Every structure is written in structure tokens, then in C-alpha cells.
Image (cartoon, helix red, strand yellow):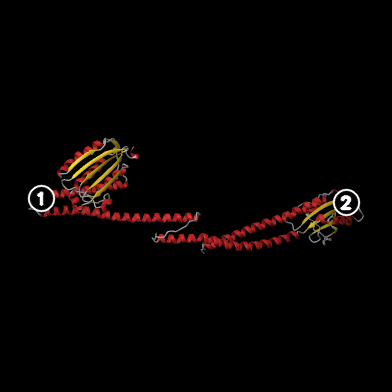
């Protein structure tokens, strides 16, 4: 059966207290027994090693009434020997048989022959200690001129048992009090531990249900506080991740919709003109040529869209290879200017190139960078009304070069400026399609510039014009060196 954390903590505390008291009790009991045993034998040795007592016992053993004389002598030593007639007694035994001759105890007729008595019978002093025996004893041989006797002291350990019983009662009371205290403490401990854990559990359930609105509060610096703050951080990261996933899913759907729309338009045109050509056998040759020209143009636009999409997908997958080498950036600027000049003049634009400073050679992929510059100038030409002004301005500062393309074209609405680098974004969709735009150029340009560890920025005012600036490090990206 499953038990709550409260119950488990209480049971653990109870088991801990019981185990601790059991160990302490066993240790104390054993120490008390050892103390009494050691004290008994130490006291006996201290008394019987007295030369005066030994001499008196020898003299008494030679008297006619030796046993009584020896008993009287031991009676005078009752204090040092601890004789109390109830638990500790003295006896005078026959030195050959161990039979009781006289003594202070009630067992004057017969005593069990112990190991110490056997030792004394053999002529040796019997100080052998046995912890497991229910008694403590000492047997000392005393040889007279004609007879042999044994002085025997025996303690039945009743004092030890009595003290152990008292101690056991004290331990029992301490155990009961300890159990009560442990229950109270364990409940307090359980509350201190379980309450924040229960809060974490409820918060985890809310997070699992998708509710990230509530946050746990904890000012404690212990493990629970660390866990609470970690949970809040995890929940925040999870919420951010889910938001990113939702945004990514929305972008994916929008991307698929844009691709479908961009491809559907040229496909529809191609199909319509092709069906007209198939059905119209009597079409004038000039009209048929125009239709074929439209089909070719739309096919080229589809090819451009697919190529751009393929390039972006390769950027996303990181599979596009760049060739980084030092090249003449100023020469590339002139090449782009000369290549786009005719197109600009075709729209009656005033197109200029201005170098603010000498332009150094830079490290980069020449073809990719020129692709970015062509896209910048091409957009300026497309989105500037005929007869406009377009300028390329470049310069060098510190360890970077920069190029700006300025125009006085239609500009971009303020709310759409942040979207210009999104895929398929276009300012004027109708005009873009007429000019063959796909809305992917700036997305590709941003990827290329990022791979060079550069930046691309755009500012614009609707009806006033646009400025787009690319900044590139002279020494190229670190991984390209």
C-alpha cells in the first residue's frame, strides 16, 4: 500500500528513535555489567593482596577451629569486600573437595563447583571472569600446616540486575518521550518539506495542462528553494519553447501557403497559355510567339523560386559551402555598379557610386557577397519609380567595411520594416511579380551576411525611400580564416 510522505517521515523518525534507544540501551547495559565485573575483581584483588590479611589467614588456618577463625577474620573485612549477606557472601571451603565449611550466606551446605573453585583446588588463585555467568566469584587457596582451605567470595549479580532494571525503566520512559517528540518533530519536518513539494506538484500539473501563468515563490536558500527557482526557470523555458514551436508552426504554414501561392500563379499562367496554343491552331504567329514568351518567362520565374527555396533550405541545413579568400572589395563594388548601370538607365534612374574612404581587400566569398550587393541594387531599381535616384556609398572604418544602397523609391510602411527579411515578404506584390521578384532575395542576403559575421540593416520611410546597409569584417569570419 502506498504511504504518503507524511507517514513515511513519521515512520522513519520513529524507527530512528527506537533504533537509537535500543543501541544506547544495549551499550549501557553492557557497560554496567562490565563495570560491576571489573570493579568486583579489582576490589577482591586489592583486599586479598594485602600481606597482613594473607598472614592472618595463614595463622587462622593453623588453629584448631580454623574454618570459624578464618570466617571471623573475613567478617572484619566485610566493608572492603562489600559483603552484604543478600547478594555478596563469603565462604570457607574444604581445600580438597570444595565442600562448604562455613560462611555468611544461606548456601552453607552446598555450592556449585565453579571454574574458580576448581582452580583453587588445584592450588592456583581463581580470578577467572565470566560475563555470561549469573554470578561473580573469587576462590583463593589457603594452606595450613596440616589442612588446606579455600576462601570463596560469591556475588549473585542481583545489584547489577536491579540497576539494569532501573536503567531499563529509565530508557523506556526516555523512549516514550523520544517517540512523542519524534512524532511532533517529524510532523513539523514533514510539513516543512511536503508543503513546498505539494505546491511544486500542483504547479507541475498546471504546467502539464498548459497553464504557465502562475509562478512559485520561495525565498529560502535550501534545496527546496533551489528546486522551486529551478522549476520556475524550467517552466519559463518550456513556455518559451512552446511559444517558439507555435511561431515556427505558424511560419511553416505561412511558408507553405506562400510557396503554393507563388508556384500556383506561374503554373496557372503556363497552363492557360499552353491550352490556348493547343486549342488555337489558327492563332496568328505573332500571338503564338507572345504566348510562348510568357510561358518561358513564367518557367524562368518558377525556376528562380525553386532555386531560391533550395538555397534557403541548404542554409537551414548548413550544407552550403563558402569559399573564403582575400579579394578586392573595391573592384567588386565597381563590377556591381557597371553590371547594374544599364538596368538603372533603362528606368531613367540616376545611379551613382561613391567611395567615402579607400576600400581595403577583405576576406570573404566573392560570389556570395556580390550576390548580396546585386540584390540590394536590384530591389532599389524595382521599387523606385522611373526617373528616381539610386546611390551606392561605401567606406571603411576600423576593422569593417560597409556599403549602403540609397533610393528615393516607394519606401516601406513603418509597421512592415521588421518584416523585410522574412521569406516571401514584398512591398508591392503585384509589381514584384511583374519584375520577377520572389520575395526571397533579402532572406538569402541576410543568411549570406550572417555567415560572414557581418550585419545587414534597413531603414525606410513610406514614400520617401529606403536605405539598406551591409557591414562586413575585413578579416572575414573566424571560421573562415
Which quarter of the figure has residue 36? bottom right
Tell me the residue that label 2 is attached to.
56
Q: As rendered, which of 439 and 386 lies closer to the eye?
A: 386
Evaluate whether residue 95 shows in this view.
Answer: no
Q: Is residue 477 left or right of residue 102?
A: left
Q: Is residue 266 above or below residue 394?
A: below
Circle nearer the N terminus (2, 1): 2
Q: As rendered, which of 219 and 262 lies closer to the eye?
A: 219
Tell me the residue that label 1 is attached to.
288
Q: Where is residue 247 in the image (x, y as percent from the top left)?
A: 32, 55
Q: How many labels does the image show?
A: 2
Q: Quadrant of the C terminus?
A: top left
Q: Is residue 207 above or below residue 350?
A: below
Q: Where is residue 326 in the image (x, y as percent from the top left)?
A: 29, 35
Q: What element carries label 2?
A: helix
Q: Position of residue 430 (x, y in %)?
A: 19, 53
Which quarter of the figure has residue 29? bottom right
- Real-space CA distance between mark 2 and mark 1, rounded to the nearest whole angstrom: 154 Å
Q: Where is residue 11 in the image (x, y as percent from the top left)?
A: 57, 62
Q: As rendered, which of 167 and 470 lies closer to the eye?
A: 470
Q: In this view, does 41 lie above or below 8?
A: above
Disc 2, disc 1: CB below 8 Å? no
Q: Is residue 49 left or right of residue 4?
A: right
Q: Is mark 1 on a helix, strand or loop?
A: helix
Which quarter of the figure has residue 114? bottom right
Evaluate whether residue 47 shows in this view.
Answer: yes
Q: In this view, does 27 lie to the left or right of 474?
A: right
Q: Dot 2, how many residues are within 10 Å of its Cα: few (below 14), some (14-19), or many (20+)?
A: few
Amino acid at each position: 500500500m502506498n504511504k504518503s510522505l507524511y507517514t513515511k517521515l513519521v515512520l522513519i523518525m520513529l524507527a530512528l528513535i527506537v533504533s537509537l534507544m535500543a543501541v544506547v540501551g544495549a551499550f549501557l547495559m553492557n557497560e554496567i555489567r562490565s563495570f560491576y565485573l571489573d570493579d568486583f575483581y579489582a576490589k577482591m584483588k586489592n583486599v586479598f593482596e594485602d600481606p597482613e590479611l594473607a598472614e592472618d589467614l595463614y595463622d587462622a588456618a593453623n588453629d584448631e577451629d580454623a574454618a570459624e577463625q578464618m570466617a571471623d577474620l573475613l567478617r572484619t573485612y566485610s566493608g572492603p569486600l562489600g559483603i552484604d549477606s543478600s547478594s555478596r557472601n563469603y565462604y570457607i571451603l574444604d581445600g580438597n573437595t570444595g565442600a562448604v565449611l562455613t560462611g555468611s550466606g544461606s548456601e552453607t551446605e552446598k555450592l556449585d563447583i565453579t571454574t574458580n573453585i576448581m582452580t583453587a583446588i588445584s592450588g592456583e588463585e581463581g580470578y577467572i571472569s565470566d560475563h555470561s555467568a549469573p554470578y561473580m566469584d573469587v576462590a583463593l587457596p589457603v594452606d595450613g600446616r596440616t589442612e588446606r582451605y579455600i576462601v570463596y567470595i560469591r556475588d549473585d549479580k542481583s545489584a547489577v540486575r536491579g540497576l539494569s532494571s532501573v536503567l531499563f525503566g529509565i530508557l523506556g520512559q526516555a523512549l516514550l518521550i523520544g517517540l512523542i517528540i519524534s512524532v511532533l518533530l517529524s510532523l513539523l519536518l514533514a510539513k516543512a518539506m511536503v508543503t513546498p513539494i505539494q505546491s511544486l506538484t500542483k504547479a507541475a500539473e498546471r504546467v502539464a495542462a498548459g497553464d504557465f501563468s502562475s509562478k512559485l515563490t520561495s525565498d529560502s536558500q535550501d534545496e527546496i528553494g533551489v528546486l522551486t527557482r529551478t522549476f520556475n526557470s524550467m517552466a519559463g523555458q518550456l513556455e518559451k519553447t512552446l511559444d517558439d514551436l507555435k511561431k515556427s508552426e505558424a511560419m511553416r504554414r505561412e511558408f507553405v501557403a506562400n510557396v503554393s501561392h507563388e508556384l500556383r500563379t506561374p503554373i496557372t499562367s503556363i497552363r492557360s497559355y499552353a491550352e490556348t496554343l493547343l486549342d488555337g491552331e489558327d492563332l496568328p504567329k505573332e500571338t503564338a510567339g507572345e504566348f510562348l514568351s510568357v510561358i518561358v518567362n513564367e518557367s524562368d520565374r518558377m525556376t528562380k523560386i525553386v532555386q531560391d527555396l533550395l538555397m534557403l533550405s541548404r542554409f537551414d541545413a548548413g550544407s552550403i559551402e563558402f569559399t573564403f579568400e582575400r579579394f578586392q572589395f573595391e573592384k567588386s563594388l565597381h563590377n556591381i555598379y557597371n553590371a547594374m548601370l544599364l538596368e538603372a538607365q533603362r528606368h531613367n534612374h540616376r545611379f551613382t557610386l561613391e567611395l567615402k574612404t579607400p576600400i581595403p581587400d577583405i576576406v570573404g566569398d566573392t560570389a556570395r557577397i556580390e550576390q548580396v550587393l546585386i540584390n540590394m541594387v536590384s530591389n532599389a531599381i524595382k521599387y523606385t519609380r522611373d526617373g528616381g535616384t539610386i546611390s551606392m556609398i561605401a567606406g571603411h572604418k576600423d576593422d569593417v567595411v560597409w556599403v549602403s544602397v540609397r533610393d528615393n523609391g516607394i519606401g516601406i510602411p513603418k509597421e512592415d520594416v521588421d518584416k523585410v527579411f522574412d521569406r516571401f515578404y514584398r512591398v508591392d506584390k503585384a509589381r514584384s511579380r511583374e519584375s520577377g521578384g520572389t520575395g526571397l532575395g533579402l532572406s538569402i542576403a541576410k543568411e549570406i551576411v550572417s555567415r560572414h559575421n557581418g550585419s545587414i540593416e534597413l531603414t525606410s520611410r513610406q514614400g520617401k525611400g529606403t536605405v539598406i546597409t551591409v557591414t562586413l569584417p575585413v578579416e572575414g569570419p573566424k571560421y573562415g580564416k
